[in-house]
Amino acid sequence: MTQNSEQSPIASAAKAELLRRLGAKHVIDRNQADLETAIRDTAGGAVDVALDVVGGSAFMTLINVLRQGGRYSSSGSIAGPLVEFDLRQLVYKDLQLTGATIVPPGTMQRLVGLIEQGLLQPLPAQSFPLRQLGDAQEAFLQKKHVGNIVVTT
């Protein structure tokens, strides 16, 4: 989320058009040579919040672009769980860093309610029967999908 409350996903160029059709005003190409400058240029400066499911080498870039008092939250590390971290960013910018994998009780009920009200729309990318779990894992590892890989019984 940027200072002007626009959401600008960072993704590969191959996913940009679909993300725009889904409502993203700007899509930042994750393969740019200077990702930090691209984020700042798109946001018009530092950002309030960075939501990350990738981790890896992009971690410090996201920390660097946060404003004073900014918030970073991670719910995954598909590009790698180990990162370098300049602790001064946390201390001098008074950042909030959180993980987001355990949800409070009642969250699923609230999500279902939002879906039923039409306020939230799930985005399944592909669906696989349980017997094709290996295929589902391979589709996930290829990282060509937008949305969720669903496995059904």
Image: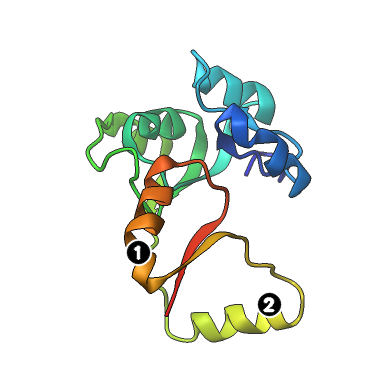
Marks 2,1: beta carbons within 8 A? no
Q: Residue at x 41, y 74 (%)?
A: 103
Height in image: 144 above or below 101?
A: above
Tell us which disc is closer to us: 2 or 1. 1
User: Does the image show residue 44?
Assistant: no
Q: Residue at x 63, y 26 (%)?
A: 45
Q: Secondary structure at mark 2?
A: helix
Q: Which residue is mark 1?
A: 133
Which quadrant of the figure contains the N terminus? top right
Q: Amino acid at mark 1?
A: Leu
The image position of residue 14, as x and y in percent, is 60, 31
Please report whichever mark, 2 or 1, sits nearer to the chain's N-terminal start: 2
Mark sitting on residue 70: none
The answer to whether residue 104 is seen in the rendering is yes
Mark 1 crowd level (few <14, some 14–19, many ≥20, 10 Å Cα): some
Q: Could you tell whether 149 is left or right of 45 in the image?
A: left
Amino acid residing under circle 2: Ile
Q: Which residue is at the front of the view, 29 or 38?
A: 29
* SS category of the residue bearing label 1: helix
The structure residue drawn at horizontal position 57% and vertical position 48%, both measured from the top left corner, is 146
Task: Categorize mark 2 by other alpha carbons within 10 Å: few (<14), some (14-19), many (20+).
Answer: few
Residue 15 occupies quadrant: top right
Quarter of the image for residue 85 reads top left
Write down the residue under mark 2.
Answer: 115
